[in-house]
Image (spheres, rainbow, N blue to C red):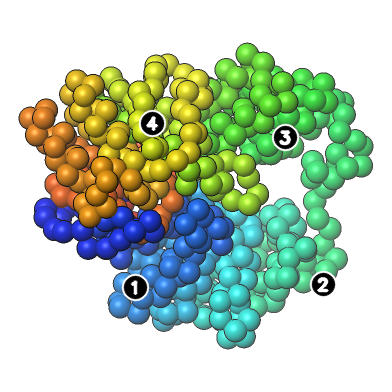
Amino acid sequence: MATLNNTVSGMASVRNSCGHAAYAMDDKTALAVMAMTSFYGEVKYYGDNTQRIMELAHQLSQRGMGEYVAQVAVWARTKGNLRTVSHALAAIVAHECSGKSFVRAAVRTIASMRGDDGTEMLAAYAALYDGGSKLPHALVRGVRDALEQMGPYQIAKYQSKARAWKMRDTLRLTHPVPQDDEASAAMRACVAGTLPVPKGWETELTERGNTAEVWNELLAEHRLGFMAELRNLRNIICSGANVEPVLQLLRDVDAVRASRQLPFRFYSAWLELSAAGLATTAVTRALDAAMCAACANADRLPGRTAVMVDSSGSMGMALSARTNVTCCDVAAVLAAMVTHISDDAWACSFDSSARTLSLTGASVLADALRVPAVGGWTNMGAAFDLLMTSGFDADRIIVLSDLEVNSSWGDNTQTIQHKLDAYRKRVGHDVWCHAIDLMGYGTQQFLGPKVNVMGGWSEQVLHFLALAEGGFGGLVEEIEAVSL
């Protein structure tokens, strides 16, 4: 995601988590970047920033910018493909701005994404505000609007029976008017606790076993969604089933784009299969095709692009306790995708020192695997020094990092902005600098004209590169254009 910071001058006003000089983000930018780089409640290398996100959302809402918070919640869910943070933001804005029409509209949009999004928003509100003893009308009505469009299958599938807050609780509170007799019957049965959960592919596997026969049948009948097929690729291969239907899905550009998968999911699938000795050439090509397809929405980057990838120790932190995917993995994938859409590119990685990377732009997967995870200090200055001596005359510099600079030239009183300024002077023109923040700690290293500070893990960051250079205002402006 993106937002432009057009401040033309200024001294470093804050310190980052390492005590190094940094610039403070404005509150709107900070909320957007943090929301787009957060699995809610997950510990990061420099601490969990969930509380900061919540504080910002409350403060902006109380300062008359609740509609913006609602728009961030919608954007995070619909564009960033992030669920929990969108639920929490929606709950906060519902609490602070309950009488505003935009709250109901935002809640309705989020609750319409998946059958349990409405239930999860109510649960989030209950967790944040006294058990949800008094729910805002706008929250209730927005969830009800979405429920009234649901069919019996969605109601049955998303009952959330194992959760503290269940679909039956949601129905009792919101009193939706069903769209037809079948939906009405499903809702009554759900409230009564007698609605059976649809027999899904998981049940089928449990009852019949993880065999080739079962997998072949499930795949032939299209019983699994895109995410389920991707996450079970190893199980499907190990069972001896015909894997071609899954590979065909991965090669389908439209299916990949509609799947709403974060690009690093394909990379992590390959890593898992490779570790198990299952990454055949056919599997590898299909996963690479999916990663290339994720670039399809982004305009090509004309001219010459310099890509800098942070491979320091803090980037080795997993995104979530439920995954082995690290921040460095995300940076590697995005760097490979940037190279893929660039006319010409030069790349390096940096930690305590910097080294040139040989990225080809041909295979996103192969290029991502060429990015090392080294560890050490975050010496972003070394990357600029390497670029300076390389002779590469860039039209733009793209930095993929958590922006927690803690080592450069032995002076922690300056940001890396002066390195960018020195490079611009060397090449004789105002090079664009796109800083893609992958952790959202709330500070930045660059400012001024032709500086674009972004945050996010999805292919949307690529979408904003060309837009920013074309004069588009960035994510804050795009969020403010969200219709509620």
Q: Which residue is mark 1?
A: 60
- Observer able to see residue 85: no
Label 4 – label 2 distance at C-alpha = 58 Å
| Residue 387 x/y as whole percent | 24, 28
Left or right: 380 in relation to 226: left
Q: Earlier in the sequence, mark 4 or mark 3?
A: 3
Mark in the foreground, 4 or 2 = 4
Query: Please, what secondary structure does the residue beneath circle 2 have?
Result: helix
Q: Earlier in the sequence, mark 3 or mark 2?
A: 2
Left or right: 169 in relation to 108: right
Q: Which residue is mark 4?
A: 349
Kindly identify which numbered label has been placed on residue 192: 2
Mark in the foreground, 2 or 1 = 1
Label 2 – label 1 distance at C-alpha = 41 Å
Question: How crowded is the residue under tag 1: few (<14 C-alpha within 10 Å), some, or many (20+)?
Answer: some
Question: How crowded is the residue under tag 2: few (<14 C-alpha within 10 Å), some, or many (20+)?
Answer: few
Q: Earlier in the sequence, mark 4 or mark 1?
A: 1
